[in-house]
Image (cartoon, rainbow, N blue to C red):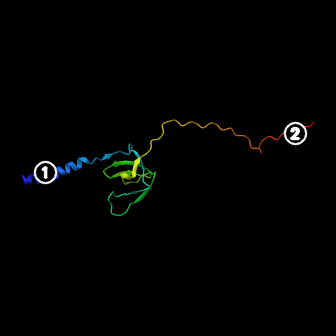
Amino acid sequence: MRIVFGVLRPVLASTLVLTGCHTFHYDDASAPAMVVSSETAPVFFHGPTQFKGPDANLIKGAEVNLLTKEVGYSYVRLYDGRRGYMANDDLAPAPKPSTTPKQKPAPTVRKKAASKAWPVPQFRY
């Protein structure tokens, strides 16, 4: 009994842990747009736990496309096509573009400049 329970305990524990971890994958065409929400956000090109420091830093408001969302980190595509890992805490959904049609500005009436205006006629009495 002890041997069976000793074997089943790790299996049950790993099953519970792995079922709690959700990973979302998006293809390139349907990758949602995200923006950097912190002042600076490190980007790691070789994995979220690489030993050296970040390969790049993005500033607040930079837009990326979410390719894979995992627990703690997301795999993203940067604006220049490079791909890397970023912390989920540094990302927020991008604001959706306005669907209301833009109104054309009112036409402006231009007056002739004083130097290009017709000369004032001189009358003789």
Q: Quadrant of the C terminus?
A: top right
Write the residue at 89% across / 37% down. Answer: 123
SS type, badge 2: loop
Q: Which residue is mark 2?
A: 122
Q: How many other residues sit within 10 Å of disc 1, few (<14), some (14-19) or many (≥20)?
A: few
1 vs 2, front mark: 1
Write the residue at 66% across / 38% down. Answer: 108
From the top left corner, tell me how far across and down residue 29 is, in percent. 39, 43
Alpha carbon separation for disc pair 1 and 2 = 110 Å
Q: Which residue is mark 1?
A: 8
Q: Residue furthest right?
A: 125
Along the line of sight, which residue is nearer the eye, 84 or 59?
59
**Residue 49 appears in which quarter of the rendering?**
bottom left
Q: How many other residues sit within 10 Å of disc 2, few (<14), some (14-19) or many (≥20)?
A: few
SS type, badge 1: helix
Q: Amino acid at mark 2?
A: Gln
From the top left corner, tell me how far across and down residue 85 is, in percent. 36, 54
